[in-house]
């Protein structure tokens, strides 16, 4: 399951006037108001992170003010060696190239891509998870925080051409423009920050090529230790698993989100000896076993979370996958 550095969750809690403790307890006004699972290796699951964002934004009332507060709270230093490598890179372009390559170190729920084929260039933010009510808010927060941090570590007057988001606007567009300091469009083809090439060539205040290269070597070692499975099966599993609670997605919908045609998706699956149904079944079976083993959800709830509308249909499928009923698996674990 994709994960997120806990620094993002702590910063959002602080932006809302709360404290997220290291043990996962959220404190507001001196009172524990919510509990998240304790972070593992400084990271929390995407589900816990998105659920926290959704819970906070619904109670805050002013999403744009919350975004602005979050952008002030989260700093480059909060993301460890990557943040330091960004700040010490010689130019803004070099900083963004490090974000593009090493963002997976802080989260595998999204990637950045620097498209410099045109002027202005586009720093594109692409999600790598299924739908969640807080996803649009997360995307706004990511670009708001990066825009502010770029202005902090760049030595010069950084001007953004415009910012775009794929989702519809949920507030006053003028307030978004005031926050970003540039025009902001919604319903666009991509989530992106647009910058002129001359902006990319601005030096950084702490730019030091030797220090940045040293830090980059550390990042290269760190990213090399991450499990990297480039198969279409692995990418599908990452997208399907969190989306199953809304029902099994259509192949055409998944293919579009992955930037390819449905025919291309089928062809690439065929190259790996698979069908779309094969991978859906694997995602459902794996998630079902994880939930039966580690959660307190009822079997009816697990059926829903794995994309089934009827518990009976889920139970028959699970018996076919594992040779056990869900109740037997929940009580005894997998057959050895």
Image: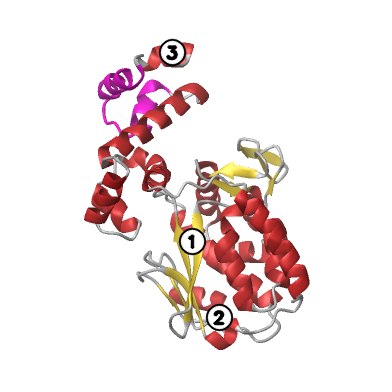
Mark toward the viewer: 1 or 2: 1
Question: Relative to 272, is 252 on the left or the right?
Answer: left
Residue under the point 70% across and 78% down: 90
State which region is magenta. 298-322
Comparing 274 with 311, the one in front is: 274
In the image, residue 12 lies in the stretch drawn in magenta: no
Mark toward the viewer: 1 or 3: 3
Label disc, if present, on residue 178 of the rendered structure: none
Residue under the point 42% across and 15% down: 329
- Residue 79: give x, y in percent of width and height: 68, 57
Comparing 157 with 301, the one in front is: 157
Task: Label 3: state its secondary structure.
Answer: loop
Q: CA distance from mark 3 to mark 2?
A: 59 Å
Mark positioned earlier in the residue sequence (1 or 3): 1
- Residue 10: give x, y in percent of width and height: 66, 51
- Let me know if residue 85 appears in the view: yes
Q: Which residue is mark 2?
A: 181
Q: Quadrant of residue 27?
A: top right
- Residue 332: give x, y in percent of width and height: 47, 11
Q: Quadrant of residue 258?
A: bottom left
**Residue at the farthest left position:** 263
Q: Which residue is mark 1?
A: 139
Task: Label 1: state its secondary structure.
Answer: helix
Mark positioned earlier in the residue sequence (1 or 2): 1
Residue under the point 58% across and 70% down: 97
Say whether marks 1 and 3 touch (CB < 8 Å): no
Neighbourhood count class around disc 3 (C-alpha, 10 Å): few under 14, some 14–19, many 20 upward = few
Comparing 229 with 82, the one in front is: 229
Comparing 324 with 231, the one in front is: 231
Neighbourhood count class around disc 2 (C-alpha, 10 Å): few under 14, some 14–19, many 20 upward = some
């Amino acid at each position: 399951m994709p994960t997120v550095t806990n620094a993002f969750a702590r910063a959002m809690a602080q932006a809302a006037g709360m404290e997220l403790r290291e043990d996962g307890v959220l404190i507001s006004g001196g009172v524990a108001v919510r509990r998240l699972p304790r972070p593992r290796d400084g990271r929390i699951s995407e589900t816990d992170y998105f659920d926290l964002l959704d819970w906070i934004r619904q109670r805050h009332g002013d999403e744009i003010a919350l975004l602005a507060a979050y952008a002030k709270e989260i700093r480059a230093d909060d993301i460890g060696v990557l943040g330091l490598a960004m700040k010490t890179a010689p130019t803004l372009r070099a900083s963004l190239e490090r974000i593009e390559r090493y963002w997976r170190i802080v989260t595998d729920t999204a990637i950045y891509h620097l498209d410099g084929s045109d002027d202005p260039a586009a720093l594109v933010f692409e999600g790598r998870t299924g739908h969640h009510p807080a996803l649009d808010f997360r995307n706004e927060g990511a670009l708001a925080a990066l825009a502010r941090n770029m202005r902090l570590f760049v030595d010069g007057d950084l001007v953004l051409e415009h910012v775009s988001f794929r989702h519809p606007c949920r507030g006053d567009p003028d307030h978004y423009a005031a926050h970003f300091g540039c025009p902001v469009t919604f319903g666009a083809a991509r989530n992106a920050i647009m910058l002129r090439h001359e902006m990319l060539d601005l030096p950084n205040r702490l730019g030091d090529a030797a220090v940045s290269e040293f830090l980059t070597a550390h990042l290269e070692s760190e990213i090399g230790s991450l499990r990297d499975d480039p198969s279409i099966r692995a990418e599908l599993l990452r997208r399907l698993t969190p989306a199953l609670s809304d029902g099994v997605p259509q192949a055409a919908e998944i293919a579009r989100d992955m930037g390819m045609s449905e025919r291309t998706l089928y062809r690439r699956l065929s190259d790996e000896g698979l069908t779309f149904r094969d991978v859906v079944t694997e995602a459902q079976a794996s998630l079902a076993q994880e939930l039966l083993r580690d959660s307190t959800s009822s079997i009816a709830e697990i059926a829903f979370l794995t994309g089934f509308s009827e518990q009976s249909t889920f139970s028959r499928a699970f018996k076919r996958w594992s040779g056990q009923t869900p109740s037997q698996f929940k009580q005894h674990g997998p057959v050895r």
